[in-house]
Amino acid sequence: MSLERPSFEGGDEPREWPPEEAVVIRHEEEPTLWKRTKIAGILRGRRRVESERVRADLPVALDRLVEERVPPFEDDDGKVVTLEDGTISIPVYREELVVTKRTVLAERIVIRKESVTETRRVEAELRRERVELSTEGDVEVIGDGVDAAAGRRG
């Protein structure tokens, strides 16, 4: 837009001002307003704590856990159970050592008797006594069949 040939909008197309009219530009001042904070005074406060001892007996409700150890139920599945009265039954496990031994066939021993003939050399010292008779004079010895060495009749 130029000042020599001003145009204005109106309708479908921009049009130029008619030459018999003059264009005047108007200025206006606007005030700028702002605020600043100024200390008006100081207010000081002091806190004082007063204490008073009070005694009173008041009932206070406390929950306590009461422990009861019982053996497991018959057909117990080992799960945490809430009983009818609202108590909770918690299973406690312990490790139990289980040793199983069984007899297993390891081997069979067959024993049989064998008769074996062996030749062994045996050495021993045997004593044998012999009796020899000698005669002098006119003595006659008649044999009775006794072997004096063996002590048997022969």
Image (cartoon, rainbow, N blue to C red):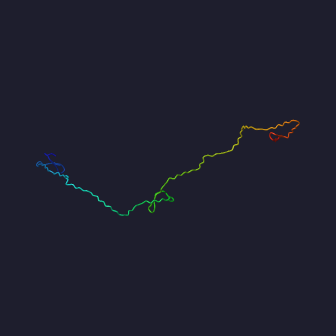
Residue 24 location (% of width, % of height) = 12, 49
State left or right for residue 38 relative to residue 92: left
Q: Is residue 138 above or below residue 76?
A: above
Q: Split into 4 quadrants, where in the image is the C terminus?
A: top right
**Observer-nearest residue: 49 or 136?**
136
Q: Is residue 45 above or below residue 112?
A: below
State left or right for residue 105 relative to residue 151: left
**Observer-nearest residue: 64 or 125?**
125
State left or right for residue 56 relative to residue 114: left
The mark total stands at 0
Give the farthest residue toward the left.
20
Residue 90 location (% of width, % of height) = 46, 57
**Observer-nearest residue: 26 or 64?**
64
Residue 68 location (% of width, % of height) = 47, 60
Residue 98 location (% of width, % of height) = 53, 52
Q: Is residue 116 above or below residue 8?
A: above
Give the farthest residue toward the right.
138
Q: Is residue 1 above or below residue 57?
A: above
